[in-house]
Amino acid sequence: MPVDAREDLIRRYDAMRGATRSLIEGLSAEDCTVQSMILASPIKWHLAHTSWFFETFILERATDDFVPFDPSFRVLFNSYYNTIGEQYSRPDRGLLTRPGLDQVLAYRDHVDREIHGCFARAERLIGRVDLEHLVEVGIQHEQQHQELILTDLKHLLSINPLHPVYRECPESEIVAPAPANWVTYADGVYHLGHEGRGFHFDNEAPSHPLLLAAFELASRPVTNAEYLEFIEAGGYRNPELWLSDGWDAARKYGWKAPAYWLGSRDRRTVFALAGLRDLRMDEPVCHLSYYEADAYARWKGARLPTEAEWEVAARGVEPCGNFVEDGFFHPVPTQQSSATRPAQMLGNLWEWTQSPYSAYPGYRAPSGALGEYNGKFMCNQFVLRGGSCATPRSHIRKTYRNFFYPDARWQFSGLRLARDRA
């Protein structure tokens, strides 16, 4: 890698690590220690695990005289890498009162100094570790955890009856969303997946041809007002609209509205990272499970798009949406709607697709521990596309594949309707 490219990489590394630290400004040690559910992790764990990633995949391999910051961290902050070794129980991460937040932050500082040292002696690392590639993977990995810090924190704060405020956030402009148009796409063979230069995760490749029938995609996501109509029409009480597993989940968890919706029909409120506030009808509906998104689409006589349809529609759309850097930490209304191009496809909220998360034709998981990053999760999950208001702007791509279990609701997840072209 040329010297200027390497310098740019270390600058991006420093900026990314600084962005993570900025997310915890104003949080107490208690805020960073508690775990609110099995699927979420304590903020302190995210801070440590992302540093563990750099220590384990780079520092440990870069020198013969490697000395870990703390040998116990190898187990405590290993997420799911069986190739690396034992992991501490995921449901019990919130019980780790030790190490304290101060020690975890010291760990981060230590790792940063050592990574800078690796760059200073990069020429001597050739053949021992692919420094540039692993640092890039580590940057992208930590950006994923930046989003998880916000979504996990929101869930934690939401169960506190004090409705605590994470951060004072600006209010987006109130708009009257234009009626959703149907944007038409012709049938044909399209090439999907990442191709060419630039970073991508292994699950975005290889690029491959796929025959698509003609379809139509809504020009904007579904709004709170539109979803409220589904609720008031008895959508949560009509089993005919629901997949069997979805109906069971709705009954089991007592779903009657999207996550974080509070109040009654007369005055609905929503919990946001800025605290409790009135539900805005012009905003896209979010914090939906796959099951809820699918039920709503059926109620409207439509369906969810496939991830291939979504990717085809996203071509030519600029990443001008609402990302974490914009500071709203909440979806904002669609400012425009067009009959020829869908709006708000990148940023704002993840959009459920009907596609199960599986391998592309010709996919092979990388060898070694990094092969566990994506490939082994290709079962029983569904793909979401587009990024959200908690996603770093530089992290998202039109080929990016997010994936969650169909009952997951704590992410900023919503929907955009699709239908077959008549």
Image (cartoon, grey):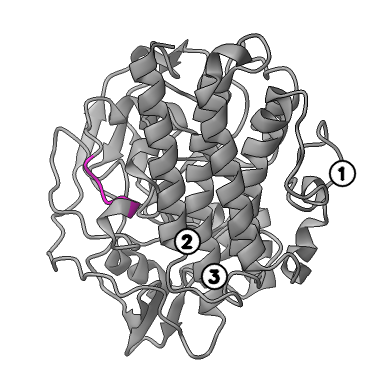
From the image, tell me which residue sits under label 3: 155
From the image, tell me which residue sits under label 1: 86
Q: Is residue 323 located in the magenta-colored stretch of the structure?
A: yes
Cα distance between the residues tagged 2 and 3 = 9 Å
Cα distance between the residues tagged 1 and 3 = 28 Å
Which of 286/231 is in front?
286
Coordinates of residue 280 in the picture (x, y in percent): 26, 73
Q: Main secondary structure of the magenta part?
A: loop
Please name which of the two marks, 2 or 3, marks the residue nearer to the observer.
2
Q: Amino acid type of disc 3?
A: His
Mark positioned earlier in the residue sequence (2 or 3): 2
Quadrant (top left, top right, bottom left, bottom right) of the N terminus: top left
Q: Is residue 239 left or right of residue 176?
A: right
Coordinates of residue 336 in the picture (x, y in percent): 12, 49
Q: Amino acid type of disc 2?
A: Leu
Please name which of the two marks, 1 or 2, marks the residue nearer to the observer.
1
